[in-house]
Image: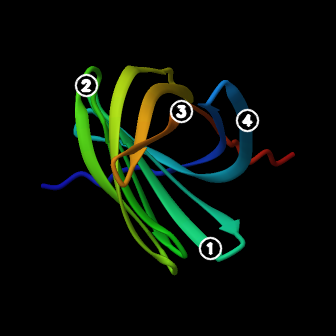
Amino acid sequence: MVRAVEQKSAKIRVKTTIWNDGENEAFELTTFGRYYEKNESIFLQYEEVIEEGTVKSIVKVSKKEALILRSGAVNMRMVFEEDKKHAGRYETPFGIMRIETMTKRLDHQVGSNTGSMDILYDLHMQGALAGTYHLEISFEEEKNEHC
């Protein structure tokens, strides 16, 4: 018998800090989505609206690896595994770029209704270093409060 996966509503915060040529810039997104656990992995699903349109993101984190899939106005696949390089792709309406991640740190903690992920990596686009990225993702279950 297959057990149904319980999806829970979550408030999700995604903060990206990019270092490139001695400069840094940070971007932060707070949104609502869903999270669930399946086969010892944590999954987060959320959508964001960017200039080109809506992008649906899925983040999967297991013991030693993380995967980010984005689809919609932008299509992207990135894999993170500490001390390893992984090839990926980034597709926009303007074309497809080869990307590669070299993960320096991959940590995550999950509590009963909260969790966080910390990923530090170098990003190469078309073979050139695009910068060092620090991705911090946290989530907490959203309770529907009724009196």
Closer to the observer: label 3 or label 2?
A: 3
Which x, y percent locates residue 134? 56, 28
Residue 133: assigned label = 3
Relative side of 132 to 13, left or right: left
Residue designated by label 4:
25
Residue designated by label 1:
54
Q: Mark 1 or mark 2, which has the lower sequence index?
A: 1
Q: Secondary structure at mark 3?
A: strand
Which x, y percent locates residue 66? 34, 37
Residue type pointed to by label 1: Thr
Q: Mark 1 or mark 3, which has the lower sequence index?
A: 1
CA gap, disc 1 to disc 3?
23 Å
Q: Secondary structure at mark 1?
A: strand
Which quarter of the figure has residue 105?
top left
Residue designated by label 2:
64
Residue type pointed to by label 4: Glu
Instruction: Please tell me how crowded label 4 is: few (under 14), some (14-19), or many (20+) other residues with Cα within 10 Å.
Output: few
